Image (tube, grey):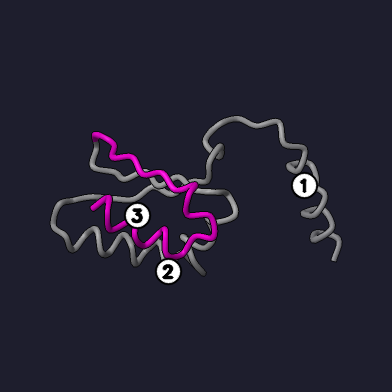
Amino acid sequence: MKELVKFIATTLAEEPEEIEIYAAEDRVLELRLAPDDVGKIIGRRGKTAKAIRTLLAVSGEGWDLDIAGHGEDEEDDDPEGDDREDADDEDDRE
C-alpha cells in the first residue's frame, strides 16, 4: 500500500523528493510532504484524499491515511498566525 500512495503522491506533488511515508502500528499510513503540496494531495473539498482513502479501503487490508506537511505537527513560531487573525477580523467587518 505504501508504494501505491507514494506513486499517487509523487505524481501530484511539485516537490516529490520531499515525500515521506511511514506505516504506523495502527494501520495508518502517514504521508509527509512539502507544505505547498498538501493542498494538491488533499484536493478540492478533500476529494483527492478521499479517493486515496477509498483505494486503501478496497484493498481489504484496513489501511487509513494521514496527510501533513513537513513541520506541521510541530509547534512553530511562525508570525503568520497573527496575520491570519487580522484577515478574519477584516472579514467580520464586511
Disc 3 residue crowd, few under 14, some 14–19, many 20+, Cα 10 Å? some
Q: Which residues are magenta?
A: 1-25
Q: Tell me which label, 2 or 1, sits earlier in the chain.
A: 2
60 or 71, which is in the foreground?
A: 71
Is disc 2 placed on a helix, strand or loop?
helix
Q: Tell me which label, 1 or 3, sits earlier in the chain.
A: 3
Q: Which mark is residue 85?
A: 1
Q: Decide: marks 1, 3 in contact (CB < 8 A)?
A: no
* Mark 1: amino acid: Glu
Q: Residue sitting at 45 percent across and 45 percent down?
A: 32
Residue under numbered circle 2: 47
Q: Which mark is residue 6?
A: 3
Of the residues tagged 3 and 2, which is closer to the observer? Answer: 3
Q: Residue sitting at 29 percent across and 36 percent down?
A: 24
Disc 2 residue crowd, few under 14, some 14–19, many 20+, Cα 10 Å? few
69 or 91, which is in the foreground?
A: 69
Q: In the image, residue 23 lies at what x, y percent?
A: 28, 40
Q: Tell me which label, 3 or 2, sits earlier in the chain.
A: 3
Spatial separation of the CA atoms under disc 1 and disc 3: 35 Å
Q: In the image, residue 19 lies at what x, y percent?
A: 44, 48
Q: Decide: marks 3, 2 in contact (CB < 8 A)?
A: no
Q: Residue sitting at 51 percent across and 69 percent down?
A: 44
Q: Is residue 17 left or right of residue 29?
A: right
Q: Is residue 8 above or below residue 24?
A: below
* Mark 3: amino acid: Lys
Q: In the image, residue 9 lies at what x, y percent?
A: 41, 58
